[in-house]
Image: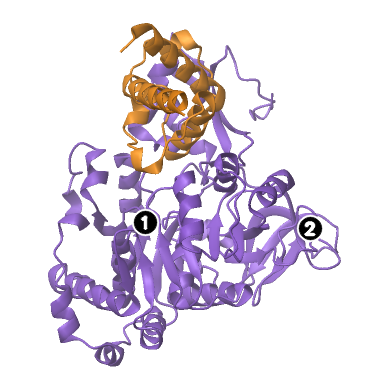
Amino acid sequence: MDLSSREKIKDRIKRVIIRDLQINLREDEIRSMKKLDDLFGMDSVAIIELIIGLEKEFNIAIQPGYLDYKIFRDLDALTDFINKLVSVKKGSDSSS
Amino acid sequence: MIEDSVAAVVRKYPEHVAISDGLKTITYCELYSQKQGYVQYLRQVLHIQKGERIALFLPNCVEFIFLFFAIADVGAIAVPLNIHLKENELQYYIVKCGITVVVTNSELLTQWGEMPSQGQGIKFILIDRLEIPRKKMRDMLSPEDDLHRSGINSVDTEVLYISTSGSTGRPHIVSRMHTNIVSGGENVAKALEITSYDRFLSVTPFFHANGFSNCMILPLLKGSTIVLMKHFSPRETLHLLKEKDITIFFGSPFIFSTLTDVADQISLPSLRFCLSTGAPLTEDLKRRFFDKFSVRLRQLYGASETGTVSIELQNQHGEGSVGTPIDNIQLKIIDDNGFELHPFETGEIIVKSPAMTKGYVDEPDLNRKVFHNGYFRTGDLGMLDDCGSIFIVGRKKKFINASGVKVDPVEIETVLLSFHKVREAHVVGMKNDRGTEIIKATLVTQQDCTVQEIIMYCKDKLADFKIPRIIEFKDSIPRDVMGKVILY
């Protein structure tokens, strides 16, 4: 995996968290956090808000069948998950 | 009483689908048979007695439904609990309600790491590890046998304890009797003209008063079909609304707002009623929802204490109205001295209903304060227009609508103040555009403290939806001479 693009995706995820979940933390404060649970109470409503924010930010659709709520509590796992969806989308866009 | 209503529906629609959860479909006859298996288990294995309290610490699932009706059948009391509660919060309900059995599942238990203490004679039952003798029960008991055996319950037998936001830092427990549950369901069924042809998409958790009454009891009283969702997911909801030809859908402003956000313009021709409750519905969301789905979004107004009070059934209610009271509901607007007000005058809404609780559990002082001459003082401020439409303008009681659950800010402040670094705490709700609120805590600390420390401390003591998303540190919290926080 391209490390720089992975880091860029992670940064965009952090921005979505701050913007769409309306928490008062700076990106650098989130940087050290691996577990999103440590930032606030990651309840089911927060997860839905995060999913909608990520879908808009990355222009992807997160299908219900792919939802593993544990992913949304771990920043690294979430980054890998989004990275995979973005790659699949790029592949299908370029082939069509 | 409830068992008689269920038996009547089973006799009328034995082969009709009662529940579909994506994996299996259950007919009314099977529902009855499964319920009988649980009745046998409660009686013969757990030795449950009349009046015993059994916690249902479960997500929306078929077992929740079987168990509730079995609990009702044996004359016990079901206590549905929010599945996001932490162990200490669960402990509060165990003591407050006098719970002797907690029914949960392995998945929920893993969030605590280990089985909670089974001291004080509390039994924890894992529903996914139970083997209920279903076929055997079906062979042993026919519906007619069961009908002859019923009679343990009268109309005023308590059957449900449901939690509601408190005003003293802890939730109150609302007691509902058999008659409350049945008449509440019948009232709404009449208003919405529910029939056995209706198909409900039930996503609102059954541990909410609205989810319990309108998404579980209401369809089963009329022989309708429940399409069950364990968790809310906007795309899955849209898929089911269309594919399963859903006719009735209860949700919250948050649910309808997210559906509107993620959906393309789609047609939902089967949907007869889309009803929002739990928080005020904005006219903007109503318009956006209609533009996307061509279905009118309607407001339902009610309370855990009263059941459903009003539904915006007509199109000509004024903007912002929550409709007119449904049948058998008496509603008045009163001033601070208890005198009834005229149309367009604002005062407190008081309600009398056959679905209404007889009171909070073990709260005699509070009961004297909020129940008068058969009316419940809702704490909502509102007015009527000259057509009898109700308009809510505010609340007397302060709470935060967090993730669709009404939370007392005092409960959160109490936890924050118990942290040794916190000297003062003030918690408020900040409105977001989805119709719910974000919890904001302003803190004065005794020593250096980080947001993460606060979050980690709260995580042990509060359900996730009660943990503040915004935490601010200040040198002081401005207060007036009476010590009341000056809003800023």
Q: How is the image coloured?
A: by chain
Q: Position of residue A11 (x, y in %)?
A: 45, 13
Residue occupying image coordinates x 29% and y 59%: B23
Residue occupying image coordinates x 41% and y 40%: A63
What is the crowding at mark 1: few (fewer than 14 residues within 10 Å), some, or many (at least 20)? many
Q: Position of residue B59 (x, y in %)?
A: 34, 52
Is residue B55 rendered to the left or right of residue B316? left
Work out whether B348 lies above or below B221.
above
Mark 2 belongs to which amino acid? Met
Is residue B193 rendered to the left or right of residue B80? right
Mark 1 belongs to which amino acid? Asn
Taking depth in this image into account, of B114 and B215 the one nearest to the observer is B215
Q: Is residue B126 visible?
A: no
- The residue identified by callout 2 is B383
Is residue A24 rendered to the left or right of residue B91? right
Task: Name the image quarter holding residue B129.
Answer: bottom left
Chain assigned orange: A
Residue occupying image coordinates x 37% and y 52%: B230
- The residue identified by callout 1 is B60
Q: Position of residue B459 (x, y in %)?
A: 36, 30
CB of mark 1 within 8 Å of CB of mark 2? no
In the rendered image, the quadrant that contains the N terminus of chain B is bottom left
Q: Sequence order check: which comes first, mark 1 or mark 2?
A: 1
Chain assigned purple: B
Tell me the subunit letter for badge 2. B
Taking depth in this image into account, of A38 and B354 the one nearest to the observer is A38
CA distance for labels 1 and 2: 36 Å
Q: Which mark is residue B368?
A: none
Taking depth in this image into account, of B159 and B284 the one nearest to the observer is B284
Asked which secondary structure carries label 2, the reply is strand
